[in-house]
Amino acid sequence: MSVERSICPDIYHPAIARDGLLTRLRIPGGVLNELQCATIAQLLDTIGLAYVQVTNRANLQLRSIDRDLDSGLLTKLTECGLAASQTAIDGIRNVMLSPTAGIDARELIDVRPLAAAWLEYLDNHSELGELSNKFSVGFDGGGSVSILDRPNDISLLAVGEDKFSLYLSMGDRGHRPQPVGVDLTIEECLPMLAAISQCYRQGIKTIGGELRRPPRLRSVIRHFGLTEFGELVRREIAGSSRLIFKNRADRDATQVNEDVHLGVHPQRQSDRYYVGIVLLLGRATGAQVSGLGAIAARYGSGHIRLTPWQNVIVPDVKERDLQKVQELITDLGLVQTATHPSSLLRACAGMTGCQFSATDTQADAIALSEYLAAKFTLNLPLNIHFSGCDKSCAQHERADITLWGTENADRTGGSYRLEIGGVMGECGQETSDLLPPERVPIAIGSLIATYHERRIDARESFSAFINHQTSAQLQELLHVV
Ligand code: SF4
């Protein structure tokens, strides 16, 4: 196992972080079977970690590792499908599906076979290991749980029973991919993905020779321009003029509700339900991972699904078993409701793991979650985001409430700038005063109490409430803080 600094790590190439080695397990499609769940629990036990963390790519992250994973452990991970057998391509097995693929009552196409075919293509093309380890492909079946806002390099969105629309990442870091005016039949998808990947690889050779790390696909597209890059792709597959890439004026801005998968939902299959479960900051202990795997084996179809919102789903539960499953999930210390204060809480690595962080975002977020859970019953989801610096790694979109870590002027530590109501507006309202971490729970609690008192009715969301406040009222709200 070789260790490198400043890369997007994979299981064979961990990165050095502030708190030790950092590595990621690529979980294509976010699907874990019972054996894989048990293996992850054993891995945590062996290397002495309290928890694993689901990432916003529905992969798993291990941090604060104090030793190399030995070859025996790596072999075990490979044998149960938690690592690629070829070290070169482990990092690019970023295959994201809607976590409700195949069970979503509203989906147009079950994308699982297509994703499996893409994974097989990757397994047979080790030359694609030259791509950025962040290279990712998303498959969206057009159902109610969409991943279209996730910043994948390529996304395929089902727009009919045999039709996908092609989306490519072209904007800034963290921006969602945009449509390029090309529709594909199911049979055309794999050749298109292969052609884009191969042209991306050729493009890296053209522009990336001097760079330390391979550029992202968006940089290659920008270098050539979308039209020219599209022509390279079209030549690669000898495609018709129907496949010409176009800059579209009608950029996609559909709001994706990331909480819709939480709780109990009927599936497209009769008498089957899925249960969406909250993981606080994506964290799950070994006992929780193996426990969820066992629940899925006993009452579901033997697998769980990680979500790109750092949560997890247990699918395929019969109605008669729902109550038992929910009790077992509660026994594991996990909640299943979108209105729990943990459900839409996000935090980046923070100062324990990242040298750029001014604050301990993870600890501060957990302290806030505990405070809010003890004091409030929310009736609508609330998205709160802690970021250790302005890079916003944990959540690129605006949140209802954002706490931005900032170094104190006297360099005695860090505090937070508070931004509220960023969801509906271009930019939220910010406090000018800095908020010390220990005051965060009381300040946010006070803000939520005011929102509950003054909102029009219980159906008014926090962002809607903020959006109709006058400037004076907003200043007053921030003053309460
Ligand atoms: S947002 Fe900033 S502090 Fe947090 S992990 Fe990213 S770079 Fe580090």
Image (spheres, grey):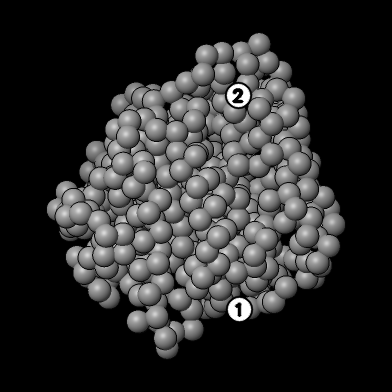
Compared with 414, 310 (above or below) is: above
Q: Position of residue 239 (x, y in %)?
A: 25, 56
Q: Position of residue 224 (x, y in %)?
A: 25, 74
Compared with 169, 118 (above or below) is: above
Residue at which label 1 appears = 5
**Badge 2 density bin: few <14, some 14–19, many ≥20, Cα 10 Å:** many
Closer-to-camera residue (455/65): 65
- Residue at left 31%, top 64%? 236
The secondary element bearing badge 1 is classed as: loop
Q: Using residue 154 as the reference point, say whether residue 224 is left or right of it.
A: left
Q: Position of residue 214 (x, y in %)?
A: 45, 76
- Image quarter of residue 424: top left
- Residue 351 visible within the image: no
Q: Amino acid at mark 1?
A: Arg
Q: Amino acid at mark 2?
A: Asp
- Image quarter of residue 437: bottom right
Q: Is mark 2 within 8 Å of ligand 1?
A: no
Real-space Cα distance between discs 1 and 2?
41 Å
Mark 1 vs mark 2: in front: 2
- Residue at left 52%, top 78%? 410
Compared with 191, 318 (above or below) is: above
Marker disc for residue 316: 2
